[in-house]
Image: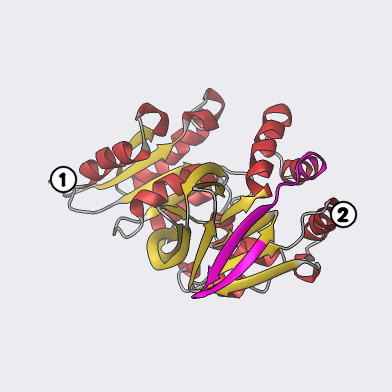
């Protein structure tokens, strides 16, 4: 075993451009910072392996060769963070975050700096904090999972991102585009802590990130904070209702919108006549078997945060 150094594994997606030549100076600074704090660094690209499980097995084997458990760093947006976190949930090795996404809700909720160099210093000098992870069937979500219109928003947003770059405005313009062109309605049965409700809805949204929910001005942000399932249902699918809902979302008044209902629970199940439903999970589209089972695994993921944020 290697006893005098600590392992640090940096996981990134080459498609994000993190390893591009224009970031070479920043990359060298990261290596310098972590080396100065006694870390031995190895870099892994998620695109080099057939799946994240295969990659993470190599990473875990590497960390097993050291006396110190070290840290596994996810560099990227929601998709990369989710992929790495899914493999570290319930494990002792903490996850470090280099925030390279559009909104960076996970980093912001934990007071992790958005500046890459400052975030690297937190990974080297901070403390591990246990955080809640929400699960829908076999998938986790750190920020949100949703059914109905939201997966269409994601697909349209990615199209806007390819055209205009990754801008926060694209999240809203893509939503407007979808509302003009598509208004799908789901016929479901939603079981909330054992009580079943028939639901016809264009959108169900489950949030796990208290900051994101708070910015939407939703009272259920406090429920997410304490480790409950936090959900939002839009009850009407007509175009006027959906335009009003989007407008109130942009204004931070979603809680006041008519035909929008929020709830919290320990467990939620979603039943459908369809055997599979399309679900958006932290910005990625997944086809999932029904029924859907949603719950929160409390304090299941250790994340490196600044000392001052450890008790938040």
Residue drawn 47% across and 29% down? 14
For residue 152: magenta? Answer: no
Q: Nearer the viewer, mark 1 or mark 2?
A: 2
- Relative to 268, 35 lies left or right: left
Query: Residue 102 sits in which quadrant?
Result: top right
Residue at mark 2: 240
Q: Residues within 10 Å of mark 1 (few under 14, many from 20)?
A: few
Residue at 32%, 45% in the rendered image: 8
The reply, left or right, for residue 11 in relation to residue 173 is: left
Examine the structure image and report whether residue 178 is included in the region drawn in magenta.
yes
Q: Residue furthest right?
A: 240
**Percent coordinates x, y for residue 111 in the rendering:** 55, 61
Badge 1 marks a residue whose secondary structure is loop
Q: Quadrant of residue 92?
A: bottom left
Query: Could you tell me residue 187's position as x and y percent?
Result: 64, 56
- Magenta residues span 177-199
Q: Which residue is mark 1?
A: 2
The front one of 226 and 2 is 226
- Residue that protrudes farthest toward the left in the picture: 1
């Amino acid at each position: 075993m290697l006893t005098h150094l600590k392992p640090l594994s940096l996981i990134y997606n080459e498609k994000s451009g993190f390893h591009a030549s224009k970031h070479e100076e920043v990359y060298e600074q990261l290596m310098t910072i972590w080396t100065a704090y006694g870390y031995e660094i190895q870099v892994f690209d998620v695109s080099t392996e057939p799946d994240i499980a295969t990659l993470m097995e190599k990473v875990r084997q590497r960390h097993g060769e050291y006396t110190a458990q070290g840290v596994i760093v996810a560099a990227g947006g929601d998709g990369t963070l989710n992929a790495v976190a899914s493999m570290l949930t319930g494990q002792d090795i903490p996850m470090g975050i280099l925030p390279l996404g559009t909104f960076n809700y996970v980093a912001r909720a934990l007071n992790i700096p958005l500046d890459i160099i400052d975030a690297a210093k937190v990974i080297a000098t901070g403390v591990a904090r246990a955080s809640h992870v929400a699960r829908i069937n076999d998938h986790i979500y750190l920020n949100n999972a949703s059914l109905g219109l939201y997966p269409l928003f994601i697909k349209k947003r990615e199209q806007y991102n390819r055209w205009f770059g990754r801008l926060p405005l694209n999240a809203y313009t893509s939503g407007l585009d979808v509302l003009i062109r598509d208004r799908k309605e789901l016929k479901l049965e939603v079981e909330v802590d054992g009580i079943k409700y028939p639901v016809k809805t264009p959108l169900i949204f489950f949030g796990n990130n208290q900051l994101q929910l708070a910015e939407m001005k939703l009272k259920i942000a406090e429920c997410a904070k304490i480790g409950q399932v936090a959900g939002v249902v839009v009850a009407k699918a007509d175009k006027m209702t959906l335009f009003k809902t989007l407008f109130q979302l942009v204004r931070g008044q979603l809680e006041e919108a008519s035909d929008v209902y929020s709830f919290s629970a320990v467990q939620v199940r979603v039943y459908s006549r369809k055997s599979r439903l399309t679900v958006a999970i932290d910005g990625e589209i997944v086809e999932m078997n029904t029924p859907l089972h949603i719950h929160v695994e409390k304090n299941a993921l250790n994340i490196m945060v600044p000392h001052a944020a450890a008790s938040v």
